[in-house]
Image (spheres, rainbow, N blue to C red):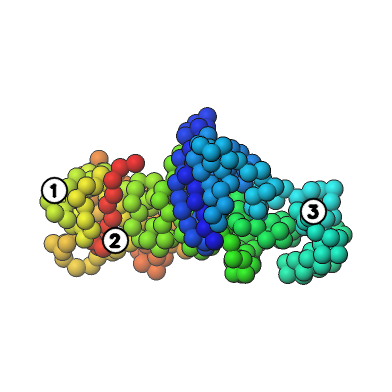
Amino acid sequence: MSLYIDINKELSSFNLDVSMESKGGIIGFLGASGSGKSMTLKCIAGIEKADSGKIIINDKVLFDSEKKINVKTKDRKVGFLFQNYALFPHMTIKDNIEIGLDRISKAEKNKLSSNFIKKFGLEGLEKRYPWQLSGGQQQRVALARALITSPDILLLDEPFSALDNHLRATMERELVEILKDYNGTVVFVTHDIAEAYRVCDKIIVFDSGKASNIREKNLLFENPLSFAEAKLTGCKNISKAKKLEDNLILAEDWDLKLKCSSNNRDTDYIAIRSHNIKLFKGQENDENVFTMSIENIVENPFDYTLYIRSIKSNKSNLIHFTISKEEMVFDINEKIKVKFEPEYLFTFKGE
């Protein structure tokens, strides 16, 4: 199973530019709202047409602007789960699930839909209508409808956005289990960082229409390669950087000189995640240890965020520092020592 996309489409606020290739698995499209994720799905499905480029699924060309190929949506073998599920309100659950089965006999249709109704835990709901179901049940119906036609690719457009937190966690686990039996490529659109990490194998970051290279999820989070990747994977601490010497960087926004373990030959930025900064109780002459002033404190459900800056500069940007509730014994304006471990610092070129 394979997916190849190389498309451009001019939109009102930006130019959509996506180039990627993947051999199956669950691919995450991660980005803010309006960054081009859903539009890319619509181009794959044939609901929207790219201005130029190619889309190929399993060696079948669905779109080629140069050869003027643009396969109709109904012939693309694409399963699409929309944000609002797009169930037909005047049709029963059984009829909604069967809507794409227009090329098989009634007996085959009944047998197949019965199997999917059982598989998705919808037994006893066949004659009900969408408005009579819970959000989770509606999602199961939409997913059954998307998969019953054995699509080559499954497109999931923020499938959990309409659910509350508890139901979202339950449906996420159910979805992951269901997809274990699906052999095609899955594209999963989300703006939720943790959700993307839990569900997907690989992730592409979208930023104002520009898609990053497809990356293994653990590598993306451990070592972002761009400002967009760092920002959209939740890194709060990003500073402009100036190389002073090999593996020594001036973090200009923090007014700190930092030893790094990474290759920073052509760097514009240096960054560290807030949970990777550590309290330090030794001597300050240790590598990457600094005395900081606590400028603000915010309590979160399970930890605290301390907003700190170097005591050597009252004009430097604040740094986000996450600390456990067990460690939290500090007040605003108090001085603390923290360490920036070199292995947790990463550098990258500009946007």
Q: Residue at x 51, y 37 (%)?
A: 66
On-image quarter of the N terminus:
bottom right
Q: Residue at x 25, y 54 (%)?
A: 292
Check disc 2 and give the amino acid type.
Tyr
Q: 119 and 43: which one is in front?
A: 43
Classify residue 2 as left or right of residue 128.
left
Classify residue 15 as left or right of residue 309.
right
Classify residue 107 as left or right of residue 180.
right
Q: Considering only order in the chain, which callout, 3 or 2, is on the residue closer to the N terminus?
A: 3
Query: Is residue 166 in sight in this rendering?
Result: no
Disc 3 marks which residue?
102
Check disc 3 and give the amino acid type.
Asp
Helix, strand or loop at disc 2? helix
Q: Residue at x 43, y 60 (%)?
A: 217
Helix, strand or loop at disc 1? strand
Tell me where residue 261 appears, x and y as whole percent.
21, 61
Tell me where residue 26 appears, x and y as whole percent.
53, 60
Q: 165 and 290: which one is in front?
A: 165
Check disc 1 and give the amino acid type.
Leu
**Mark 1 crowd level (few <14, some 14–19, many ≥20, 10 Å Cα):** few
Numbered mark located on residue 50 in the image: none
Q: Quadrant of residue 321?
A: bottom left
Q: Quadrant of residue 273?
A: bottom left
Disc 2 marks which residue?
344
Query: Is residue 141 in sight in this rendering?
Result: yes
Give me the C-alpha separation between circle 3 and circle 1.
67 Å
Disc 1 marks which residue?
244
Q: 297 and 182: which one is in front?
A: 182
Q: Residue at x 58, y 62 (%)?
A: 184
Give me the C-alpha separation between circle 1 and circle 2.
19 Å
| 211 vs 292: above or below | above
**Mark 2 crowd level (few <14, some 14–19, many ≥20, 10 Å Cα):** some
